[in-house]
Amino acid sequence: MALGSNKTAAAINVTPLIDVLLVLLIIFMVLPHPSTGLKSDVPQPPLENQPAPPNPQHLVLRIQESGSIEINSQPVLLSQLSERLQTLFAVRPDGVLFVDGAKELQFEDVANVIDIAHGVGVNRIGLLTAKQQYP
């Protein structure tokens, strides 16, 4: 309201814009969002504090600090790794490959081995970590 003036001032009515904004906010809160990321299986503790028996379907691939590779304590050259994994997982289609890399390794070395395993069709790969003792 302007005193002593006959001119009308143009003003934007923001009430409809706020209504539209609130409706869109409610719609996006209610709609389910597809989850993105890696699918992971969380290991469960064994029953009655008994160690779980080793599964013959699973393999452990260790990468030593020197870069040498072992599959279930049997040495394998990096150039032969894809052939070896392909033959091992031909008889273990539901098996899991656990990768245990030395702490001193670069992540690139571990990622290279994981890429080779994915390339030959290994779908389930787990990473082994050192168990930490907390006070």
Image (spheres, rainbow, N blue to C red):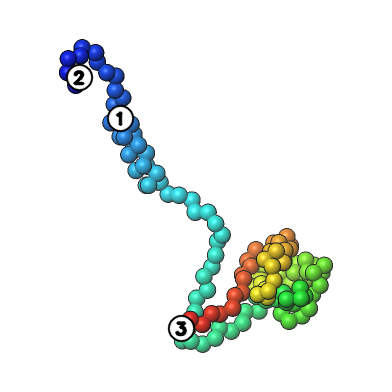
Which of the two residues, 12 or 64, is positioned nearer the viewer here? 12
Q: Residue at x 77, y 80 (%)?
A: 74
Q: Position of residue 76 (x, y in %)?
A: 79, 75
Q: Which mark is residue 14?
A: 1
Q: Earlier in the sequence, mark 2 or mark 1?
A: 2
Q: Looking at the picture, which amino acid does disc 3 mark? A: Pro
> In which image quadrant can residue 75 be found?
bottom right
Q: Looking at the picture, which amino acid does disc 1 mark? A: Val
Horizontal side of 38 relative to 108 (left or right) equals left
Residue lying farthest to the top in this orientation: 6
The residue mark sitting in front, 3 or 2, is 2
- Which residue bears the numbered disc 3? 135
**In contact (CB < 8 Å): disc 1 and disc 3:** no
* Helix, strand or loop status at disc 1: loop
Q: Residue at x 37, y 39 (%)?
A: 24
Q: Earlier in the sequence, mark 1 or mark 3?
A: 1
Q: Earlier in the sequence, mark 3 or mark 2?
A: 2
Horizontal side of 2 relative to 76 (left or right) equals left
For label 1, count other residues whose C-alpha is less than 10 Å away and answer few (under 14), some (14-19) or many (20+). Answer: few
Q: Position of residue 32 (x, y in %)?
A: 42, 49
2 up-or-down from 52: above or below: above
